[in-house]
Image: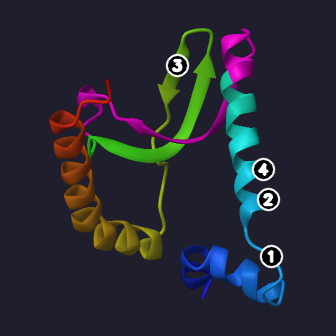
Amino acid sequence: ALDKHVQDAGTDVVNAKDGKGSATLSMAYAGAKFGNAVLNGLAGNETTECAYVARDADEDAQLPYMASKVTFGPHGVKQALPLGSLNSYEQTRLAECLTQLKDEIEAGVAYANSTSLA
């Protein structure tokens, strides 16, 4: 049940507001929290927050990019932390999403390599 709520979080917020609002404030809060973590890190106060980052090749990651806890420091991302131990349900859900994530990452990288933003 929690998976469904996470996947449909924006819709759940709109439904809870009876159609009179959106999840914009929640997204703004998440963006502010992330920005604060990055800025604190750059100011020398190491801060850990979740982020979607490139994984180190030497960590034997299943995907080149993954969301996880990240420690920000004076030079940006100091360390992308491992996912940690997962229970059997979490391991199953991760395995289920790896193929789709891999395809989406490949499509995004292909787009970035073929598109000039200048």
Residue in the picture at 52% in, 19% down: 78
Q: Amino acid at mark 4?
A: Tyr
What kind of element bears circle 2?
helix
The reply to whether the C-beta atoms of the residues labelled 2 and 1 are less than 8 Å apart is: yes
Nearer the camera: disc 1 or disc 4: 1
> Residue 12's x, y, as percent?
70, 83
Nearer the camera: disc 2 or disc 3: 2
* Sequence-earlier tag: 3 or 1: 1
Find the distance from the CA under tag 3 to the CA under tag 1: 37 Å
Residue behind mark 3:
78
The reply to whether the C-beta atoms of the residues labelled 2 and 4 are less than 8 Å apart is: yes
Residue in the picture at 73% in, 10% down: 43
Q: Which mark is residue 29?
A: 4
User: What is the quadrant of residue 117 in the picture?
Assistant: top left
> Residue 5's x, y, as percent?
62, 81
Magenta region: 39-60
Q: Amino acid at mark 3?
A: Lys
* Pick the front one: 72 or 81: 72
Q: Amino acid at mark 2?
A: Leu
What kind of element bears circle 1?
loop
Find the distance from the CA under tag 3 to the CA under tag 4: 23 Å
Residue behind mark 1:
21
The reply to whether the C-beta atoms of the residues labelled 3 and 1 are less than 8 Å apart is: no
Residue behind mark 2:
25
